Image: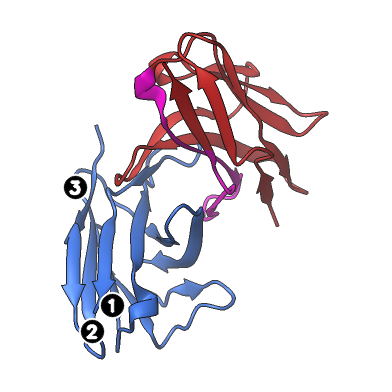
Chain colours: A red, B blue
Amino acid sequence: AQSVTQLDSQVPVFEEAPVELRCNYSSSVSVYLFWYVQYPNQGLQLLLKYLSGSTLVKGINGFEAEFNKSQTSFHLRKPSVHISDTAEYFCAVSAYSSASKIIFGSGTRLSIRP
Amino acid sequence: GAVVSQHPSRVICKSGTSVKIECRSLDFQATTMFWYRQFPKKSLMLMATSNEGSKATYEQGVEKDKFLINHASLTLSTLTVTSAHPEDSSFYICSARDRTGYGNTIYFGEGSWLTVV
């Protein structure tokens, strides 16, 4: 079975400052990794995903994440945040098998201060 | 791009009644769809995996007789909350796997708010 741990439930950051949202996963098999964003009262939007290949993955809205197999981490980063980045961010994992399901972390609320 | 549509986006029903939520893949075929539930300010909890043409697989602790899932075609899965109670009020989100996509191509719907009064 797979599991995801997001260590920070809330991350307050000043506008234009860098941010890192932490994610660690556990799995006995190879996995795909995802970061989703959820704006207030909306559904989920895929920010980026790691399938294979380069461990540094670039996504939408200037976000990127780095897959670290030895540390079983997939931290999300952005060099300079904007007010519009205020949202809930979910790290997720899915096993390689074709019928597997996505398991979500508990989420990190990113709040941007002007 | 691929779109997954949920309907209705918001529904209010009386306690004791049943309500159906639809999840459609609009431009791809989905042999597998997933239903999640999200409580306010909480993460998404996987309820069940819906497989086209067969019975859904429910996660531990989810009442299969209360949350009926039907996946009758490659583009439609439905979740019916039977004999709804106020504690069933929640945000329900579906996702669909594009069977032709590479690497677990999964798309999420916009979610459906259920309020039981």
Q: Position of residue B84 (x, y in %)?
A: 30, 84
In the rendered structure, the residue with mark 1 lies on which chain?
B
Please determine if labels 2 and 3 lie on a single subunit.
yes
> For mark 2, what is the residue?
B18
Q: Position of residue B56 (x, y in %)?
A: 43, 74
Closer to the chain start, of discs 1 and 2, is 2
The relative height of residue B38 versus residue A91 in the rendered view (above or below) is below
- C-alpha gap between disc 2 and disc 3: 25 Å
Q: Position of residue B25 (x, y in %)?
A: 24, 51
Q: Mark 2 or 3, which is nearer the eye?
A: 2
Q: Mark 1 or 3, which is nearer the eye?
A: 1
- C-alpha gap between disc 1 and disc 2: 7 Å
Specify the segment rendered in magenta.
Answer: A83-108
Numbered mark located on residue B80 in the image: 1
Q: Are marks 1 and 2 in contact (CB under 8 Å)?
A: yes
Please determine if labels 1 and 2 lie on a single subunit.
yes
In the rendered structure, the residue with mark 2 lies on which chain?
B
The relative height of residue B98 versus residue A86 in the rendered view (above or below) is below
Circle 3: element type: loop
Closer to the chain start, of discs 2 and 3, is 2
- C-alpha gap between disc 1 and disc 3: 20 Å
Three-letter amino acid code at the position of disc 3: Leu
Q: Residue furthest front?
A: A114
